Image (cartoon, helix red, strand yellow):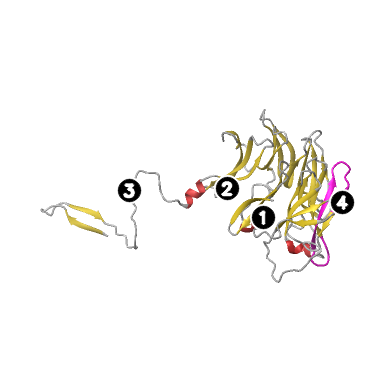
Amino acid sequence: LVGLRNSSEKRRRWALKAVIKAKEKNGVLPVPTLSKLHPLTLRDAYAADYVARTTLSGDGSLVCSSVHRADLAADKWRSYLQIRNTSNGNVVLDLKAFPQAGSAYFSPDGGSLAFQTPDPLNKKTHDLWLLNLKTHEMTKLLSAQRDLRDILWAPGGDFLYFIATAPRKRPKTPPPYERFTQMYQRWTGWQNWSHAFSFSMKDGSLHQLTAGPDTVQDMALSPDGKTLALLRIVHTVPRPYLITEIWTYDVDSGRSKRVLRWLRWPDVSELCFSPDGKKIAFVSSPTNMPPGGNKPKEQLAYDFDLFVLNLASGKTKDLTANFAPAVDSQCIGDYPGRRNVWWSPLDGKIYFIATDKDTVKLYRT
């Protein structure tokens, strides 16, 4: 309410007086203060940096994280890589010269860091870089790679393995129409065939290890560096149009062997070798495991279990059959820094992330 009041008996001097009343029940009026403390606002939330995709060096002395910051003026998220010392938390290096860099992976000896950045000439592709952590020297390893991800270092540091979209020859002049004959051709991105690649750190040669329309979804490297485990999606003409297979690939001879096959397309992920390289742990829905079994009346889409595959016998074992939480962190939209499953060489236990109601927790077998 704004009103006028008589400031003196002579009725000559007048002053304006503002009066504010709180009509809400139990309402509290803001009080002028010089303190910086105030209720959290959306702008405050955007002003705070957040960290994603954190990775540790082999000896645990360094941690590399992708730091994200909101640029409200440009209405964009900015990010850069930051390396810190794990013993005292001090910043070792900020890679702000490479905006939007990500997917960082330490070399086995901890002396180098491989990471990717958007190609400045083509935003749809990425460049692969190598940072020497002692000299801070930068070396570009690869250019114009599409959908490069899941970099794996060989134990000796002489090779890099990764998944990327394989280059394909396309006609300069697209046809006026294209006839679709398969169900998968109606899905987004079906022409992007992701495959496994190897890169030699010695001579800089790049080799494509897999080919064809059957794409590689995930990959793991055995502790001795001799075998790759490949999770492949295979196209079929009849239903279910896609099936899932797990293959092993000998990196020296190039020989491959299929060790597991599903006739249906389950949500499989997180291939992880045992310390002795004789078993593979992975995450999958129990209702889609061969040979089938009794399917429940209602299948829960997020009912994931932890399985172990014996490579010699080809038999699988469900380790969490009577475990209530769902093995995975993406059930409630919470994504881990890199993986959901780790097989420790120290105690031989499998550490995994699972969703218990509305909470993500770390478990051990």
Which badge, 2 or 3, comes first in the chain's sequence? 3
- CA distance for labels 2 and 4: 43 Å
Mark closest to the chain's N terminus, 4 or 3: 3
Determine the image quadrant of residue 113: top right
* Mark with earlier residue (1, 4): 4
Residue hosting label 2:
77
Q: Which residue is mark 1?
A: 328
Category of crowding for the residue at label 3, using alpha-carbon neighbours closer than 10 angstroms: few (below 14), some (14–19), many (at least 20): few
Badge 4 local density, few (<14 within 10 Å), some, or many (20+)? Answer: few
- Mark 2 vs mark 4, foreground winner is 4
- x and y percent of residue 327 in the render? 67, 56
Quadrant for residue 100, please give it. top right
Residue 205 placement (x, y as % from top left): 82, 38
Rendered position, 226 above or below 41: above
* Distance between mark 2 and mark 3 Cα atoms: 34 Å
Out of 356 and 191, give the one closest to the viewer. Answer: 356
Above-or-below relation of 297 to 214: below
The question of residue 177 being in magenta is answered with: no
Q: Position of residue 278 (x, y in %)?
A: 81, 47
Q: Can residue 98 be spotted in the picture?
A: no
